[in-house]
Image (cartoon, helix red, strand yellow):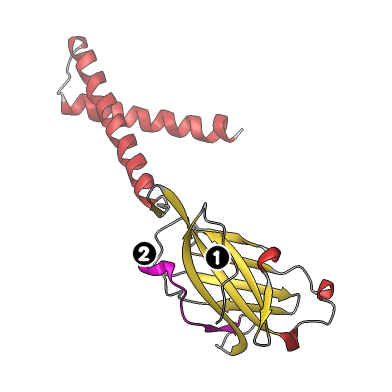
Amino acid sequence: MAIFFFLAPVVFVVAFFVGLLGTYLVHAMEWAHFWKATGASLGITMGVLFAIAGFFMLQAPIRPVEGGSPLVLEVEVYIPLARVPAHRDEFDPMTMSLYAGPRDNQFASIDTALNRTGNGMLIVTGLAGLNSNSYSRTISFNIDQNTWLALDHLPIAAKPSEKDSVWSALMPMRDATIAEPQYTDVQARVRVVKRERIPQPSTGL
């Protein structure tokens, strides 16, 4: 119904005025100028369509790649064991997401096979695809229904390079359930890896 009652009339009106504009530009005054005016109108229409398409193509996210391979953000979250139940199956399913803009907001995958403990911490590993060259990225992490944490302004370049493949320093995650920044004892670090690379547990902090 929207196509029939809204889009079709709009297209008809726009086409009518484009036709008038083409007629005016070629100074068509008689039927002999019909095809000339038609060609001008089609040229104007195609130019406008190409301009609109080009604008949206420029706005489309550009996926960072290295050597033809898509890049992935690897995240390690360090949770004090005091926060972890004695039986870890009591944990609600942990979730992680990466926000890189209104057009790039996605869930990350948490590979529980890479989880490990060390220095009194449970270390959780997550992977999130980098789908755009963003100047501001934020990691969100839910430990349970009542614990929502965030790590803002990741130290990763908008267009990641080789230097971003090195682990960042550990950074405290803030409590995302309150407006004012309040940092917690949960920390995280990040690096960029190629998609086909299977992360292995790292040693040390």
Q: Position of residue 126 (x, y in %)?
A: 61, 66
Mark drawn on residue 79? none
Helix, strand or loop under label 2:
helix
Q: Residue at x 81, y 82 (%)?
A: 85
Helix, strand or loop under label 1:
strand
Q: Against 24, is 61 above or below?
A: below
Position of 48 with respect to 73 (left or right) is: left
Circles 1 and 2, Cβ within 8 Å, touching? The answer is: no
Q: Nearer the viewer, mark 1 or mark 2?
A: 2
Location of the N terminus by quadrant is: top right
Which residue occupies the extreme left position in the image? 27
Q: Earlier in the sequence, mark 1 or mark 2?
A: 1
Q: Residue at x 58, y 59 (%)?
A: 106
Q: Position of residue 178 (x, y in %)?
A: 62, 85
Q: Which residues are magenta?
A: 161-175
Which residue position holds label 2?
162
Give 35 or 167, whichever is nearer the viewer. 167
Location of the C terminus by quadrant is: bottom right
174 falls in the magenta region: yes
Position of 53 with respect to 108 (left or right) is: left
Which residue occupies the extreme top position in the image? 32
Q: Against 190, is 109 above or below?
A: above
Exactly how many numbered labels are in the figure? 2
Give 196 or 25, whichever is nearer the viewer. 196
Which residue occupies the extreme front position in the image? 203
Q: CA distance from mark 1 to mark 2?
A: 21 Å
Q: Residue at x 52, y 51 (%)?
A: 196
Examine the image and state in which quarter residue 75 appears.
bottom right
Which residue position holds label 1?
98
Q: Against 204, is 113 above or below?
A: above
Examine the image and state in which quarter residue 176 appears.
bottom right
Q: Residue flagged by tag 1: what amino acid is it?
A: Leu
